[in-house]
Image (cartoon, helix red, strand yellow):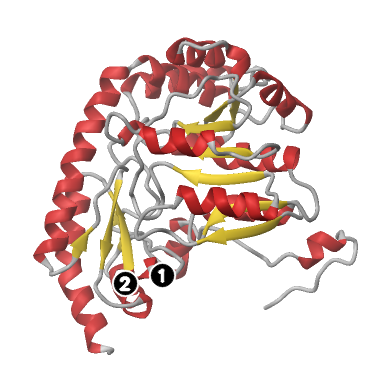
Amino acid sequence: MAHPTDPRLTPLAQSLPATVPFVGPETQERTRGKPFAARLGANESGFGPSPRAIAALQSSAADIWQYPDPEAYDLRQALAAHHDIDAAHIMVGEGIDTLLGNLVRLIITSGDAVITSAGAYPTFNYHVTGFGGVLHSVPYAGNHEDPDRLIAKAKEVGAKLIYIANPDNPMGSHHDAATLQRMISAVPDGCLLVLDEAYIDLAPDGTAPYVAPHDHRVIRMRTFSKAYGLAGARTGYAIGPAPLIAAFDRVRNHFGMNRSSQAAALAALADQDWLTQVQGKVAACRDSLAAIARGNGLTPLPSATNFVTIDCGQDGTFARRVLVALGDAGIFVRMPFVAPHDRCIRVSCGPDAEIAAFAAALPQALASARSQE
C-alpha cells in the first residue's frame, strides 16, 4: 500500500523516487519466510574478521556506554602509519556509503553535473540525486569501466565529480595502476575524481596507482567491509588532500562511528597475517566459482574482487530467472542492474559449504530458467 507524501518535505525530497539501492538479504528472508542456506550476494567476507578484531569487539562491549572518540584518533593514526602519510589526509566514516554521501553534500548542489558509468555502484547515484546533482553516465567498454569516456564526458558537461571503482562492482574487472594514473592526470580543472577502492585488498599487485595525498584531483575511498571482514561494523575511510578532508568536519555525524567498530578496525589493521590468509581463501574460492560456472556451460568473468560475475549466456530476463530460482533454492546471490551486464549473476566468495550449496542448486536453477523460455 502506497503512502501519501508528507507535504512538509522539500520540493527536492518530494521529487525523489523511494529508492533502496540494495534490498538486504534479511528483507528477502522475511518475504520468503525462512533463512537462506547460502549468503553469497552482498560481497561480505564469509571467512570472517581477524580473531583479534573479534576480541576487540568483545573487550570493548563493557565500555559501550561511552560515546565514541569523534576524531577516531587512534584509528586515523594507525591508518596514517599503514599508508605512510599524515593523518590530516584521512577521514574515517561509517563505511564508504556514508563517506560518499558526505562528499556529495560538500561538493554538489542543485544542477551540478556528476559523471559515472551506466550500471556502476548505485549508492553513489542515490546520494547525487538526493542532493540535487545531475547524473551523466557513459557505457562500459565491455566489462570494464571506461576512463577515457568518463573524462571526455566530464569535460563536455563541466562535471564537478567523476566516479570510478577500481576494482569494479558489479563486473569484478580492474584497470592497472598506469591506466588510473593517466586518468588522474586528465581530470579537468575544478573536477574531483572519486576513486572507490573497496576491493583493492583483493586485487592483483599493480592495481592501486600511486597518488600523492595532497593531489587535489582525487579522493580515494577504502573500507574494512570486504577483505577485513567487518561489513557489519560500518568502517571506511577516505584519503585525500588535507583541506578537503578537513571539510568533512563541516557536515559529518561526529558521533556516527561506533566505539566498538573503531576498536575492531584498529585490531584488524594490525593483523596483516589474517588479511593474507583471507586473500588466499578468496583466490581459491574464485577458482572454485569459475569451475562451477564452466561446469554448467556458463562463462565466469575474470575477477579482482571477492566475487565472481558469471555470464549466463542470454539476456537479463533469463539471468533474472536464474537468480529467482537460486533464491527459491535458498541461495542468495545478486545480479547487475543494467543491460548488457544484466545477462550475468554475481556470486560472492564464501565458505566451502555455501559454495557447495550454490553448486548443487545451479543446475536446477538453469533448468528452471530454460523451461520458461
Residue found at x 45% / y 38%: 231
Q: Marks 1/2: CA distance?
A: 8 Å
Disc 1 residue type (three-letter): Arg
> Can residue 306 be spotted in the picture?
yes
Indicate the quadrant where residue 257 lies: top right
| On screen, residue 2 above or below 146 | below
Marks 1 and 2 close (CB-CB < 8 Å)? yes
Secondary element type, mark 2: helix
Q: What is the x, y in percent for residue 182? A: 46, 36
Q: Which mark is residue 328?
A: 2
Indicate the quadrant where residue 215 lies: top right
Instruction: Decide which of 35, 78 is in the foreground and name it.
Output: 78
Between circles 1 and 2, the one closer to the viewer is 2
Q: Between disc 1 and disc 2, whose residue precedes?
A: 1
Q: What is the x, y in percent for residue 67? A: 67, 21
The answer to whether 69 appears left or right of 283 in the picture is right
| On screen, residue 25 above or below 232 | below
Disc 2 residue type (three-letter): Asp
| On screen, residue 320 above or below 209 | below
Dividing the image into 4 quarters, which one contains the N terminus? bottom right
| Residue highlighted by disc 1 | 32
